Image (cartoon, rainbow, N blue to C red):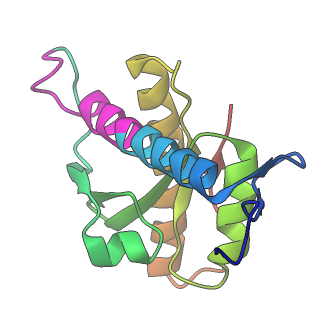
Amino acid sequence: MGYHKNPVPAYIDNNVFLDRHEKEIWWEVAQRVGHFMEEKFLEALNPDKDPSLILPDWFISVRLATPEEDHRGMDVVVRMDVGPLFIQLKSSRTNVDRFQLKHRGRTRIAIIVVKPEDSVTTIRKKFFQAATRERAWLWKRRRREQVSNAPTIIDW
């Protein structure tokens, strides 16, 4: 005889309770959406996919995070002339807030909210907005000027 006749509920969002099986399905869907958004982000910055894309001179390369980097909260790493830009991609502001609670005081990571309906052009605009802010932050830090600890969050 099993210890639990009824599944133990798991809290997800908005007071919705799911049993363990439903929670596993929810997690799998969230993982797939995350991977889809990462691939979509990389495609948006790939000149081979869009020959009209002209990247600035400061942009060196973009890649998915390594497993170690991913464990530290990074999804994408962009090499720039002033240093690396670490990016976390999120699908909502709620997920941004959760990420910030979990990753306080660690490596500086820009957060970009990318929605499934975002076009390649929108993703590029969000990236360049984040990169502009982070490059300015890195230049200031390099010159030993006072810098803000506020993270770069692009959410529109």
The residues colored magenta run 36-51
Q: How many marks do you count on the picture?
A: 0
Q: Position of residue 80 (x, y in %)?
A: 28, 58
- Residue extending farthest to the right is 15
Determine if residue 4 is in view: yes
In this rendering, the answer to whether 9 lies above or below 50 is below
The residue that appears at 73% across and 72% down in the rendered structure is: 101
The residue that appears at 58% across and 46% down in the rendered structure is: 26
Does the magenta segment cover residue 38? yes
- Apparent side of residue 142 relative to residue 79 in the rendered image (left or right): right
User: Residue 93 versus residue 46: which sits nearer the camera?
Assistant: 93
User: Residue 2 versus residue 140: which sits nearer the camera?
Assistant: 2
Q: Position of residue 58 (x, y in %)?
A: 27, 50
In this rendering, the answer to whether 126 lies above or below 106 is above
Q: Quadrant of the C terminus?
A: top right
Does the magenta segment cover residue 80? no
In this rendering, the answer to whether 154 lies above or below 117 is below
Q: Position of residue 83 (x, y in %)?
A: 32, 69
